[in-house]
Image (cartoon, rainbow, N blue to C red):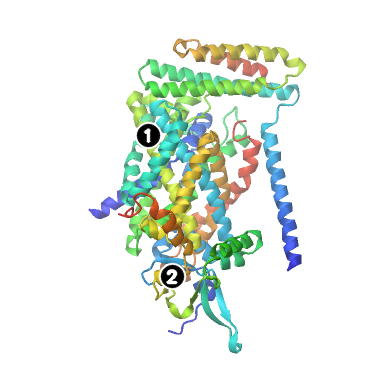
Amino acid sequence: MKQAFAFTLGTLSAIGGFIDIGDLVADAQVGARFGLRLAWVTLFSVAGIMCFSEMAGRIAIKTQRPALALARSRLGPRFGLFGLIGSLLVTGLLVMAELAGVALALQLATSINYLLWVPVAALFVLIVVWRLPFETMERLYGVLGLTMLVFVVAVFQLDPNWPNMAQSATTIAPTASESWATYLFFVVALIGAQMTPYEMFFFSSGAVDHRWRPRDLWEMRVNVIVGFPLGGLLAVAIQATAFLVLFEPGIAVEHLSQTALPVAVALGKAGLIVAIVGIFAATFGATLETLFSTSYDVAQYFGWSYGKLQPPARASRFVTTMLAMLFGATALALTTINPITVTIVAVVCSASLLPFLFLPVLLVANDRELMGEMANGKLSNAVGTATLVLSCVVSTLAFPLLILTKGGTV
Amino acid sequence: MSRLVSARIALLDNQIVDCHRLPIGRADDLEIELGGGVPRITALLIGSQPLGDRIGGHLGRAMAAVSARLRRGAEDDGPPAIPVSSIRDLEPLIELDLELDDLPNVAALEQWLAAHFVERLPGSGDASE
Amino acid sequence: MVLTVKRHTARTATLTFAAILAIAGALAYVTAPPKGLDGYRERAAATAETLASQVETASLWVQVQADGKATTAATLVGLEEAAEDGRAAATTFEGYEPPTEAVTLRGRFASLAAEQERWLDLPALSAPLSGLAEEWTRFEERAEP
C-alpha cells in the first residue's frame, strides 16, 4: 500500500515537472501556428528526457550522489563550474518565469494585475518551502497538477476531425504561410521547454534525498515510464486545443490567457476554472522545482549540506542560496519585463545548454567502475547517444534561429 | 586494506562526509609532502580558496581571493585541511571518523550564516518535519 | 607567470568584447526599423497580422463570455491584453518613417487602428470585431510586397 502510494507521488511530480510555463506557452504557440506538425518533437523530447532521467535516477541510487555532483568528479572542476553557471543562469530565468506564471494564473482568476500577485506568489512559495515537508509539497502540486488533464478532455469535447488531426501530426513541414526557419525555431523552443535539465537534476537529487536504494530501482523506473509520457500527452493536448480553436482565425499566442481560452470554448466556465487551477498548480510546482534544482546544483558543486531533510541551520548556505534566488526572481518579475518573452529566451538558452548537461550524465552512467552492474545497457546508450547528438545540433542552431526569426515573431 | 586507488578518481573533487554522513565539503585539493623522496598525500584541502587556485583564470583567482578574504580575522592558518589519517572509508563518499562539529575551521560560512541569518528567520527550527 | 597572466587578460578582453559586439549586433538586427519600401510594406503586413490576431482573440473572448462559457475575470484579462498588445504593435509601426510611396498605406493603417481603438474600448458592442479582423487581413494582403 505504501509502495503504491509512493508510485503515484513520484508519477504525479513527474507530470507536474514536465508541464511548466515553457510548455504552457510554447505548446499553445506551436498549436496555433503549426497545428500538430510539431507533435513529433514532443515524442522525441519525452524519449530523451525519460532516458536521461532514468540514468540520473539510477546514478543517484547506485552512488548515493546526484548526477551533477558526479560531473565535477569526473570532468573536473572547470567543466563543472561551466555547467553550474550555465544552468544557474537558465534555471534562474525560469524561476522568474514560473513565478510570473503563478501570478498570471492568479490574474486570470481575479483580473487583478499580475504584478500585484508576484509578491504574494513569492510569499506563498516561501511559506511552502519553509514549512511544508517534502512529501506534502509533492502531493500538493502533484494532485492539483492532475487538473491539467482538462486539456485532454477539451480535445475530445471539441470533436475534432480525426483524419485531419492525423494528417497534421504526420506532416513534418511548416504550414503554407510559415518559413522553415520559424518551423525549426519552434522545434528548438519545444525541445528546450520539454527536455528541461532541471527536471533531471531535481529527480536525481530527490532520489538522494529520499534515500532510494537499489531495491527502489523499479519504483524509480515506473515513475519515469508513467510520468513523462503523461506529461507529453498533456503537452500534445495543449497543442491540439490551440490548433482546433486558434489556428483557423490566425491567432498568435502571446499570453497565458490564450492557452486557457480554447478550454473555455470547449468546456465552458467550469472547464476554464479547472484549467486555471491546473496552470496555477503546474507553474507553482515548477517554481518549487526550479528553485530547489538551482540551489541543489550550487550546494552539490561545493559539497555543502543541502536538502529538505536537513534542518535549515544545518544547511544555512543552501537555504541562503534558495532565498537569494527567490528574492532575485521576484525582483526581476517586478521590473515588468514580459514574462512570456523571458520564457521563450529561457527555453532557447536551455536548449543550447543541453549537450553540456547530458554528456556528463551519459559518461557517469557508463562508468563501470562506479556503476558496476547498474551501468548503462544497450538501450539506454542507444537512446542516450541519439539524444545527445541531436541536442548538439539543437544547441548549435538555437541562438542563430532565435535572432534570425526574432524569437519566432517573423 | 592495501588497495590501489586513483587519487584523481577516489579523492580529488569527491564529496567528504563526517561520521554521521553529514556533508563537510569536497576534496577541493590535495596536500602532498615530498619528504624522504617519496611524495605522500597528507591532507585533503577544503574550500573555495584551494578550489579557485585549481580552476585558475580570472574566475578562479577571484574565487580564491574572496575566500581568503572572508577567512581573514580568524587566526589564519590556511584553508581547512583534513589529515588523511582520519579517512575511514573512500566509497562511495570519503567518510571521516570525525564529527563536523569537531572541525571548527570547516564550513565557517555555514556557521556564520546559520547564526546571523537563518536561525533568526521565523520558524527555522522544524522545516524538516 | 606574468606573461601568461597578460595573455589571459588579453584573451578575456577580446572574448568579452566580441560577445558584447555580438549581443549588440543581434539586438540591433531584432529591433531595427524597416528599410525601403519593401521593408516598410513587409512590416505593415506583419503588424496587420498581429492586429488581426488581437482582434480575433478579443472577439473569441467576447463570444465565449456571451455564451456564458467564461468567467468575467478571465474575459476582462483577455480583452485587456488584446487591446494593450494591439495598441503597442500599432504604436511601434506608426513610429516608423514611411517612404513617400507608402503614405496612403500609412493613412489606411492609421484609420483602421483608430477604428480598432474604438471597438476595443467598448468590447460589449463587439459584433463588428470580426469584420475588423477581416479588414486587417485584407490590409495585410495588400501591403505584402
Image side of residue C110 versus residue C21, left or right: left
Label 1: few (<14), some (14–19) or many (≥20) C-alpha neighbours in 10 Å? some
Q: Are marks 2 and 1 in contact (CB under 8 Å)?
A: no
- Vertical order, A311 against A109 (above or below): below
Tally of marks: 2
Q: Which residue is mark 1?
A: A152
Residue A159 seen in render: no
Residue C24 seen in render: yes
Q: Position of residue A162 (x, y in %)?
A: 42, 30
> Which residue is more in the foreground, A124 or C73?
A124
Residue A111: give its label: none
Q: Position of residue B19 (x, y in %)?
A: 37, 72
Q: Which residue is mark 2?
A: B93
Q: CA distance from mark 2 to mark 1?
A: 46 Å
Q: Quadrant of residue A265?
A: top left
Q: Residue furthest bottom?
A: B36
Which mark lies nearer to you, 2 or 1? 2
Mark 1 belongs to chain = A
- Vertical order, A321 against A409 (above or below): below
> Which residue is more in the foreground, A23 or A97?
A97
Q: Residue at x 66, y 16 (%)?
A: C142
Image side of residue A151 versus residue C143, left or right: left
- Vertical order, C34 against A392 (above or below): above
Label 2: few (<14), some (14–19) or many (≥20) C-alpha neighbours in 10 Å? many
> Which residue is more in the foreground, A269 or C131?
A269
SS for dot 2: loop
Q: Position of residue C49 (x, y in %)?
A: 59, 22
Q: Position of residue B33 (x, y in %)?
A: 58, 82
Amino acid, disc 2:
Leu
- For the C terminus of chain A, give its image quadrant: top right
